[in-house]
Image: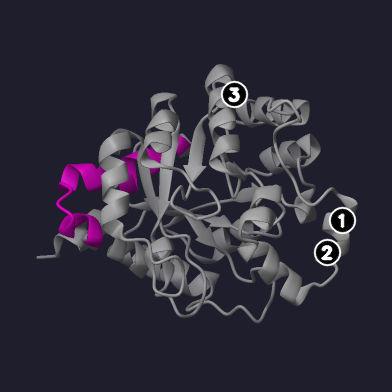
Amino acid sequence: MPAPSERLLRGAIDIHAHAYPEYTLALRPRQDNYDWALLAKEYGMRGIMLKSHVWPTMAQVYDLSKLVEGIELYSSITLNYTAGGLSPVAVALAGEMGAKAVFMPTWSAKNDIERSGVMAARIRKVCPLLDDLLKANGGGITVLDHRGKVKPEVLDILDIIKTYDMYLESGHLHISEGLRLAEACAVKGVRFSLTHPHNTTVGATAEQQKEVADMGGYIEHTYIACMPLHLRVNPRDIAKSIRLAGVAKTIFTTDSINAFNPPEPELMRMVIETLLHLEFSEAEISKMVRENPAEILRLPPDPGM
């Protein structure tokens, strides 16, 4: 008989897994996209969404889907400078090519650069031209104007996201920006997810996470935040946030990257095992790793469940 974590992994969907290559060929993963897609299929997962900090992943998903059958693969675009920044045209073309999600900027976010610069530092290490780019663009991207209002081009992007039935991730924006985006999405009827709120760049308190959930947004927790060479977030702290914001609006993902982490499907198994240890019920875990990801992706019921 399979262990509870193995049983709950069947039908799980990871909506935040990094594709290879990711900004440099030197950043080797534990397994490449093909190998971990095969492993996800072997584990019985339903699907995976590929994310990249540099390029849209629609072409990667198109090619990989032809190589690995029996696993659903979804694509996304992250609005960093390399993908056009806050470009309605880039978002519309991503929608035309089947993208499921739009991530707000990560290494191009003014907030990421000013608060920690972790992603920007990594990009700068392989591409020193980044400093010239940032200088020419005011030091990074923000979604709010000088009055603290959501910029018109961002509102246009939300309209396009709704037109193509995609959803919005907050990326590496500060929680102050994330809250304004959550409000705008609620008004426009756009599905919204607050990305890794425990990330030091985002800096969202448990109460702010609940505020997003109360507006109808999802809270996406990423497991690599708990890993030794990342942020070392205590999973018990995440559990407290989940209990406050509610399981009904929580999604758990891997944010898989780096060869010193297990491959993405094994990280997802670790997510489930950790949640079991923290005394979440099997029904609650299923909600966070199966049902809620399917809802935000607007998928039909899983025929295998």
Could you classify mark 3 by the number of other residues whose Cα lies within 10 Å: few (under 14), some (14-19), or many (20 or more)? some
Please say if the residues under marks 3 and 1 sit with CB atoms less than 8 Å apart. no
The x, y position of residue 175, in whole percent, is 54, 40
* Closer to us: 294 or 141: 141
Residue wearing tag 1: 135
- In magenta, the rendered stretch is 274-296
Q: Quadrant where the N terminus lies? A: bottom left
Please say if the residues under marks 2 and 1 sit with CB atoms less than 8 Å apart. yes
Q: Is 19 colored magenta in this rendering?
A: no
Side (left or right) of 149 relative to 12:
right
Describe the colour scheme in one phrase: one colour
Give the residue type at disc 1. Answer: Lys
The x, y position of residue 289, in whole percent, is 33, 49
Give the answer, above or below, for where 270 lies relative to 258. Answer: above
Please say if the residues under marks 2 and 3 sit with CB atoms less than 8 Å apart. no
Could you classify mark 1 by the number of other residues whose Cα lies within 10 Å: few (under 14), some (14-19), or many (20 or more)? few
**Mark drawn on residue 184:** 3
Tell me, yes or no, if residue 44 can be seen here: yes
Earlier along the polypeptide chain: callout 3 or callout 1? 1
Q: Quadrant where the C terminus lies? A: top left
The x, y position of residue 206, in whole percent, is 36, 40
Tell me what residue is drawn at x 68 percent, y 68 percent. 121
Give the answer, above or below, for where 104 lies relative to 245. Answer: below
Give the residue type at disc 2. Answer: Asp
**Mark drawn on residue 131:** 2
For mark 1, give the secondary structure.
helix
* Closer to us: 260 or 230: 230
